[in-house]
Amino acid sequence: MSVRVRFAPSPTGYLHIGGLRTALYNYLFARRNGGTLVLRIEDTDRARFVADAESDILESLRWSGIDVDEGPELGGPFGPYRQSERSALYRDAAEQLIASGHAYYAFDTPEALDAMRNRLASQGSSSPRYDAMTRMEMTNSLTLDANEVSARLSAGDPHVVRLKVNSGQDITFTDAIRGQVTFRSDEVDDQILLKSDGLPTYHLANVVDDHHMEITHVIRGEEWLSSTPKHILLYRYFGWAPPEMAHLPLIFSPSGGKLSKRKSEIEGIPVFVREYRQIGYEADALVNYLAFLGWNPGDDRELFSKEELISEFSLERVGSSGVQFSIDKLKWYNEQHLRSLPDTELVTRVQRDLVKRGIETDEKYLTRVLSVMTDRISLAADLASQARYFFEDPRGYDEAGVKKRWKGDSAELLSAYAGRLASIEPFDAATAETALRDLADEQKVGAGRIIHPVRLALSGVTFGPGLFELIEVLGRETCLRRIRAAVDTLGH
């Protein structure tokens, strides 16, 4: 059987960075093995449904270069691909389990459920739940006679369908990442399969869909590991062969613990893919970094194209231990991918961002700017946010820089240097440097006495590319105008 994997997000929020890694690993595994990647939208949780979440998921996958083979937009032989459109299939499956004695109707009110849990908690239970120990004390089709069950159903009494889990059993499966995993059935509750609104829970729907969509490998986050025994039981009760399971390690925040929205707000690390797009990260860089959050190629290589990731990826090289997210490491990846872009593509990328910020410039000049700035930016957007002085005169001067660098003789020295710049030929970095150092020698001052205030005059700040490269890129007219403006503004 050919490999078929699925990415099955729930549209209860925007696509999380951990969700993108799950999609990526499924994508790489499918492409590496000549298989099929299915996108399935698990939208049965109507209480937490977010209207634009599905469109965000689709757009984030497109932006990341993760193309699916079947899904809501593309269709396919196993559709529909939204669970809300497959309800009849789940109801039939639940009825099949009831008929075989592996599930039952439960009519318990919320108050009765609370009373049961409170009673168990007061008796010292650390995990009070609806299970083999408590089901016979509750109101369900196991404790009511058949006529009453039929009457309640006919009357439309609120009810759910629960999985019947027998106690005293080992539930064992082999995880492609973690090896053999065993749970005791005593630790598994009688999970709700169909909710009172008639919609399935994740557990029933994903098992039914994975079977009917002929999924061969389920690659998902570690948070679903504890749910797997319920799924194994469902496969067993339906008489179906389960797919191979692979549970990916958690992604931790820098301070420890799962990378979450709350952690993001505290630590300033985005958790949604859309945020990385808005900030200006390169899709290829983010994909490269996420691939390494759990997987490694077995050597010291770090920079991979998508095609190289496909050719190297395997579940055998995915670890089971949690991995820590580092925004600094991601920035490093972004820098490397930016620098690997062809000049024309980098110019297009940066120019697009400049236009958004109201900065117009021609490609020829931008190419010159990037020749001195590519190694100094982490994001394409950094040029506009950190080096706007390439495109417009400074509107002010860094106060701390002025206090430290603008001395009593700065105006006189800069006026003299402007005179030299006005006549040097050719107007380039080497000649500009020679002129400055000659002037410093003549005035018997250190070169820094001129270099630092000139930088302030040209950029308004005390940092940036090499001063003489900056002078060459800005050109003679701009340099003279800015130096004279700084002399007039900052004075003697």
Image (cartoon, helix red, strand yellow):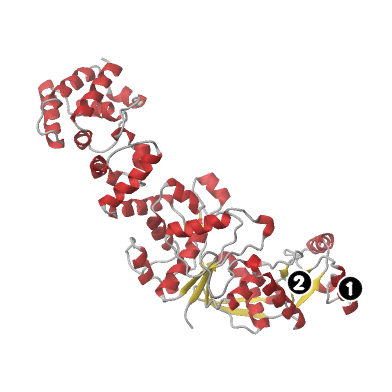
Q: Secondary structure at mark 2?
A: strand
The image shows residue 148 at horizontal and vertical percentages of 90, 74
Q: Which residue has dot 1 on it?
A: 151
Comparing labels 1 and 2, the label whose residue is closer to the camera: 1
Instruction: Count the labels in the image.
Output: 2
> Along the line of sight, which residue is nearer the eye, 265 or 28?
28
Q: Position of residue 318 (x, y in %)?
A: 45, 69
In the picture, residue 10 is in which quadrant? Answer: bottom right
Q: In x, y percent, where is residue 399?
A: 36, 24
Point 73% across, 63% down: residue: 126
| Residue 88 x, y percent position in the rendering | 69, 72
Amino acid, disc 1: Ala
User: Left or right of 446: which side holds 82?
Assistant: right
Residue 50 is at least partly visible in this image: yes
Disc marking residue 6: none
**What residue type is disc 2 on?**
Val
Residue, far top: 492
Closer-to-camera residue (176/6)? 6
N-terminal-most mark, 1 or 2: 1
Give the crowd class for mark 1: few <14, some 14-19, many >=20 residues within 10 Å: few
Q: Is residue 348 above or below residue 440?
A: below
Locate residue 272 relative to residue 189 in the image: left or right.
left
